[in-house]
Image (cartoon, rainbow, N blue to C red):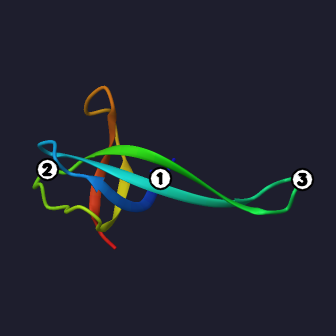
Amino acid sequence: MPKRILSGRVISSTNNKTITVLVERRFKHPVMKKTMRKTKKYCAHDAQNSAKLGEIVQIQECSPISKTKSWVLLGES
């Protein structure tokens, strides 16, 4: 099964080797037919501490690194 790749904005990079990425998805409501937005925050592993606040990055799922981290930083998009 292929690993998921998500794109989002870095909202926190204060922790060592960890970034928080806000991923937004858009979908059409099944009844109202209105385009809606949902957001979710993911903690991702950033080994070189290269991501800065506000950057658009891509993350890929991986095996769990810690309790909350199961995503790894691929790069900037």
What amino acid type should be assigned to the residue bearing mark 3?
Val
> Splitting the image into 4 quarters, where does residue 65 fall?
top left
Q: Nearer the viewer, residue 11 or 65?
A: 11
Select label 3 or label 1 by which is in front: 3
Q: Residues within 10 Å of mark 3 (few under 14, many from 20)?
A: few
Residue 72 screen position, x and y as percent: 29, 49
Of the image marks 3 and 1, the number of the one nearer the N terminus = 1
Instruction: Specify the quadrant of the image occupied by residue 74.
Output: bottom left
**17 shown above or below 74:** above
Q: Which residue is mark 1?
A: 4
The kind of residue tagged 2 is Ala
Q: Classify mark 2: helix, strand or loop.
A: loop
Q: CA distance from mark 3 to mark 1?
A: 28 Å
Q: Percent from the top left, x then y, of residue 67?
A: 31, 26
Q: Is residue 7 above or below residue 72?
A: below
List the residue tagged with mark 2: 47
Label 2 environment density (alpha carbons within 10 Å; few <14, some 14–19, many ≥20): few
Instruction: Pinpoint residue 55: horizontal percent, then vertical percent.
Output: 29, 68
Q: Position of residue 47 (x, y in %)?
A: 13, 50
Dot 1, how many residues are within 10 Å of its Cα: few (below 14), some (14-19), or many (20+)?
few
Residue 36 in which image quadrant: bottom right
Q: Residue at x 44, y 57 (%)?
A: 5
The residue tagged 3 is 31
Query: Under tag 3, what secondary structure?
Result: loop
| 49 with respect to 70 (left or right) | left
